[in-house]
């Protein structure tokens, strides 16, 4: 399988779909729509939507059916990045290789662009087609739970409260599972739902998602200290500067690498019930382990 081609065709399809979901930059009020588009089209990898499409295909569905949900997860992700970069949060000047939203549009407009993206994500999700096992409410609930105060926001709260403190590996795992793995897992589950996955299949996708999501954040922690700002497209070395608890900080770089390997292996094992059909998700897991940004 030509993985580069697999990735780029889906990436292009996601770009097109996002372009349709978002109001044009000329739509009044222009500033907010321009700001929303600026961050959405700033050059993200599109990992979450591609995982969503891949999960639908692994279950045997058409990836087109999962596109509204794929857009929804990418839009929630982009909102979280805009807010995470604000001076009152991580205070970052660069994201996706470009100046952050508040640097270009000012803080007030960046907050609003994040708010508007979070809202329009649910509009996008509402455009999904219900399946025999999963109605619209189930899909919307999945996205809401993963994004809210018992999902991504919970992780962000624990992350902020943990800054400068000595926290346990269990606490760090709680942060990573919520801040990062929750939305990644939901992206994969939503793809499965769009393809009418059987309950046991959805369980297998969930196990895959949690291990992959954790591995993704451990690798992100490692890259923060091993890569340059240019390579990452966002400021490197921020975790050390903010005295953040990370896997390398708590356990050392070598052990963090081992953990990323172990989690990737665990995620691949969860795909066993899918046999050969699970190959695309397996390749995505391998690609994430080796990524440089
Ligand atoms: C509610 C005010 C308010 C803020 C919410 C929840 C939140 C802010 C932020 C948490 C989200 C966050 C920054 C998680 C970290 C996950 C992570 C490693 C993101 C980078 O993902 P990539 O590498 O990025 O997929 P690209 O740019 O490629 O999409």
Image: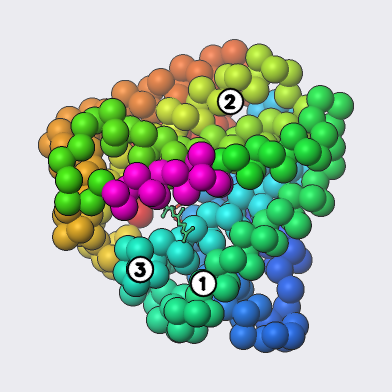
Regarding residue 56, the answer to whether it shows in the image is: no
Question: In what quadrant of the picture does the C terminus appear?
Answer: bottom left
Disc 2: which residue: 205
- Give the residue displayed 62% in from the left and 59% down from the top: 118
Q: Which mark is residue 111?
A: 1
Does residue 149 show up magenta in the picture? yes
Q: CA distance from mark 2 to mark 3?
A: 35 Å
Q: Which mark is residue 228?
A: none
Q: Which residues are magenta?
A: 147-161
Regarding residue 82, the answer to whether it shows in the image is: yes
For marks 1 and 2 on the same chain, the one whose residue lies earlier in the sequence: 1
Disc 3: which residue: 88
Secondary structure category for the residue under label 1: helix
Give neighbour class at mark 3: few <14, some 14-19, many 20+ (Cα, 10 Å).
few
Residue 290: x percent and y percent? 34, 41
Dominant SS in magenta: helix
Q: Given this view, does label 2 or label 3 mark the residue nearer the observer? A: 3
- Give the residue displayed 55% in from the left and 67% down from the top: 114
Question: In what quadrant of the picture does the N terminus appear?
Answer: top right
Q: Is the CB of mark 1 within 8 Å of ligand 1?
A: yes
Secondary structure category for the residue under label 3: loop
In which quadrant of this rendering is ligand 1 seen?
A: bottom left
Q: CA distance from mark 1 to mark 3?
A: 11 Å
Name the image quarter holding residue 277: top right
Viewer-nearest residue: 100 or 55: 100
Residue 280: x percent and y percent? 57, 33
């Amino acid at each position: 399988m030509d993985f580069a081609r697999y990735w780029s065709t889906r990436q292009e399809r996601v770009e097109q779909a996002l372009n349709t979901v978002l109001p044009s930059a000329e739509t009044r009020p222009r500033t907010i729509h321009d700001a929303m588009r600026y961050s959405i089209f700033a050059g993200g990898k599109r990992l979450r939507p591609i995982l969503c499409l891949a999960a639908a295909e692994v279950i045997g569905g058409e990836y087109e059916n999962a596109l509204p949900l794929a857009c929804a997860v990418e839009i929630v992700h982009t909102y979280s990045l805009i807010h995470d970069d604000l001076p009152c949060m991580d205070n970052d000047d660069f994201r996706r290789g470009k100046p952050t939203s508040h640097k270009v549009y000012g803080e007030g407009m960046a907050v609003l662009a994040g708010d508007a993206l979070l809202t329009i994500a649910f509009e996008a999700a509402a455009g999904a087609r219900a399946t025999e096992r999963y109605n619209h409410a189930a899909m919307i609930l999945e996205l809401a739970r993963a994004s809210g105060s018992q999902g991504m926001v919970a992780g962000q709260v624990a992350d902020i409260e943990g800054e400068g403190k000595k926290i346990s590996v269990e606490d760090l795992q709680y942060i990573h599972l919520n801040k990062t793995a929750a939305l990644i897992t939901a992206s994969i589950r939503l793809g499965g739902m769009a393809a009418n996955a059987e309950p046991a299949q959805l369980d297998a996708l969930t196990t895959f998602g949690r291990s992959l999501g954790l591995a993704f954040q451990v690798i992100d922690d490692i890259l923060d200290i091993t890569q340059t700002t240019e390579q990452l497209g966002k400021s490197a070395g921020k975790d050390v500067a903010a005295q953040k608890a990370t896997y390398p900080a708590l356990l050392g770089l070598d052990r963090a690498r081992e953990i990323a390997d172990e989690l990737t292996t665990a995620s691949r094992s969860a795909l066993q019930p899918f046999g050969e059909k699970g190959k695309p998700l397996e390749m995505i897991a391998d690609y994430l382990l080796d990524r440089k940004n």
